[in-house]
Image: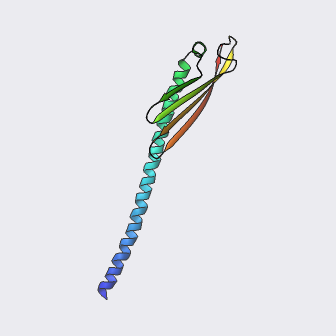
Amino acid sequence: MKKSFSLLITLILITIFSFFTIFIIQTKAFSISNTTNTYLQMQTKFHLDFFKQYINSLDLKTKCLDTLSYNEDIYKIYANITFENGCTSNLPQDVTIDIFASSKSLNNEINLHESIIKHIN
């Protein structure tokens, strides 16, 4: 009787500790996933800011660009440039620049968008 009772208690304790271990491992995995998403989003934002600075340094009037793109293994950046009166117009006009940045890893995908309105004389 004592051996069966001690075996039952042992099985119950192993089951309880197994559930706690699974819960702790799931919590750690979720935390690591959140950290990975945060890192991926920050890196995508850095790429977007760099691309925005690059576009601001370009002379859009003389180059007459419609789109710009940059592709890497993980990061893809695309800019759509729209002129109010067409790029050949000599009138002062506004240029709308839509920048789309995305990063993709094995389990996660981050998509960012920023719109800029630039005035050209």
* Residue at figure coordinates x 49%, y 35% from the top left: 44
Relative vertical location of residue 77 with respect to residue 105 in this rendering, above or below: above
Q: Residue furthest left?
A: 3
* Residue 26 image position (x, y, % from top left): 43, 58
Q: Horizontally, is 92 left or right of 27 in the view?
A: right
* Residue 49 image position (x, y, % from top left): 52, 29
In the image, 17 versus 108, the foreground residue is 108
* Residue at figure coordinates x 30%, y 86% from the top left: 2
Q: Horizontally, is 16 left or right of 113 in the view?
A: left
* Residue 102 image position (x, y, % from top left): 52, 36
Q: Residue furthest bottom?
A: 1
* Residue 72 image position (x, y, % from top left): 44, 32
Relative vertical location of residue 23 with respect to residue 117 in this rendering, above or below: below
Relative vertical location of residue 106 with respect to residue 59 in this rendering, above or below: below
Picture quarter with the C terminus: top right
Q: Residue furthest top?
A: 90
Picture quarter with the N terminus: bottom left
Q: Horizontally, is 117 left or right of 9 in the view?
A: right
Quarter of the view holding residue 115? top right
* Residue at figure coordinates x 53%, y 33% from the top left: 101
* Residue at figure coordinates x 57%, y 27% from the top left: 79
